[in-house]
Image: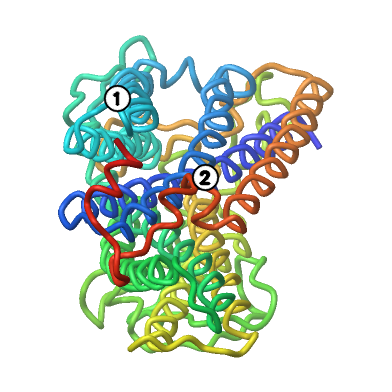
Amino acid sequence: MDVLELARWQFGITTVYHFLMVPLTIGLSVLVAAMQTAWVRTGKLRHLKMTKFWGKLLLVNFAMGVVTGIVQEFQFGMSWSAYSRFVGDVFGAPLAMEGLLAFFVESVFLGLWIFGWDRLPKKIHLACAWAFSLATMASAYFILAANSWMQHPVGVEFVNGKPTMNSIGAVLTNNTALAAIPHTLAGAFSVAAAFLVGVAGWHLWRRRSSSDAHREVWRSSLRLGGWVGVVAFAVLAITGDMQGKLMFEQQPMKMASAEALCHTEKPASFSIIAVGDVANANCEDVKTFNVPALLSFLAHNDFSTEVKGVENLVSGYQAKYGTNYPDDPALGSLAGKPIDYVPSLPVTYWGFRIMIGFGAISAGIGLLALWLTRRGRIPGGRWFPLMVLGGIATPFIGNSAGWIFTEMGRQPFVVAPNPTGVEGMWMFTAQAVSKLTVGEVLTSLISLTVLYAVLGVVELYLMRKYIRGGVDAVLPPAASSAKDSDGSDDSDDQALSFAY
């Protein structure tokens, strides 16, 4: 392996690992704020128990997200310093906004929420929960705005051979970002929903034959997660269609690769699944099960439009961006070599389908759990907890596959060219890497991978501990022994005596 390949592995491992925490934090923060709102409005102890239990898990996940997220900022100076010098004037603005505005607000109000249970007025404390959750989404907005600029650079001009931002508004309202943000947030709610369904379903199944004081906590949590998951998948489908149409305009090679569309078709069929080796750009050995003309509709909103295939797009890319890398020693072994404009077809093709497939499975499990627990029912078979617990992993896999597809499909560019933007505004990934030795990058790669593995064990241990402990692990004895709102003793005074 050379420096470029090792640097890409390092960034990929740390980014995907960090992104496991991000969607759960975003989705769960909003749902916890909604639970607390229900408690403040109704005074029902059930909603307080839900807030406390899910809030504890939120805090564990948030802490791990902060620890792993800090490394992401340093990546740009460690292995990608050439990239940082090229895009620093543009990329720095949304990242600074994320750190100084969104993350600062997020951290302050989270601290007030954690330590303000018995110190702040009830509604002020609730406002802190909402401020934290909204700041979490704002943080995602600024990060996505930065990433979307890499996918579709806007609001810049060339000054001394480097992009200089001339409109922060254009960067923050980039149409690529405006499509990515609702899609990513819907994915986050899908993750949080599956988490609620899985954990609550397991607890509900364990207590199916006993009169547990917290049963309604688990039933309410499961049903909330089920409905949120179904709605989130519907939003994912709508926003995913919007993103797909933009990508056919902005990065046609990415979308052709996602379909293993090697040759131009008119109309173009949508590939459901391929049989054979999709690694070759001629696709001669690949047989696919297709839906006729559907890809033309997904690309251009009609069933007769031509969609260009990989082989035809290559010649267009070569004409616009060159056939060979610059003869620059900084490019190492790639200096002067032919440019491969085709991303990894197996990664893009299967990543696209894993993203869609696991998202659909997650929504399906949530919908089935809603049906199985209707009217107070609790399934008795051992398959039920296995199904809902396994369902927790499905949106995580779908989200990760979506990000891998998005980033890998952009190759060989780290800053993809805007077809209608500033001429020459792009950067090859091979040009972005720092001048390091293989040993230096390998050392940091191994160190970070081992560190993240340890952090993963710590998070799983803490999550398992508090999940298994249930409501009793997060409430003091006086509150946890009180009866729920559906029992005979659910006065407002009891809740307030605990919380304030």
Do we see residue 15 in this rendering? yes
Circle 2: residue type = Met
Do we see residue 311 in this rendering? no
Q: Residue at x 57, y 36 (%)?
A: 64
Q: Quadrant of the C terminus?
A: top left
Mark 2 surroundings within 10 Å by alpha-carbon count, few (fewer than 14), some (14 through 19), many (20 or more): many
**Drawn side of residue 343 relative to residue 316, left or right:** right
Q: Name the residue carrying label 2.
A: 21
Q: Name the residue carrying label 1.
A: 105
Mark 1 surroundings within 10 Å by alpha-carbon count, few (fewer than 14), some (14 through 19), many (20 or more): many
Q: x and y percent of residue 195 in the render? A: 48, 61
Q: Residue at x 17, y 58 (%)?
A: 42
Q: Secondary structure at mark 2?
A: helix
Q: Is the C-beta separation of discs 1 and 2 under 8 Å?
A: no
Q: Quadrant of residue 46?
A: bottom left
Q: Secondary structure at mark 1?
A: helix
Query: Height in image: 361 above or below 496?
Result: below
- Furthest residue to the right? 439
Q: Residue at x 31, y 76 (%)?
A: 296
- Front-lying residue, 272 or 43: 43
Q: x and y percent of residue 233 in the render? A: 34, 70
**Drawn side of residue 89 relative to residue 253, left or right:** left
Q: Quadrant of the N terminus?
A: top right
Q: Quadrant of residue 68?
A: top right
**Drawn side of residue 62 relative to residue 231, left or right:** right
**Drawn side of residue 32 relative to residue 316, left or right:** left
Counting residues from the N terminus, which is met first, the one under dot 1 or under dot 2?
Answer: 2
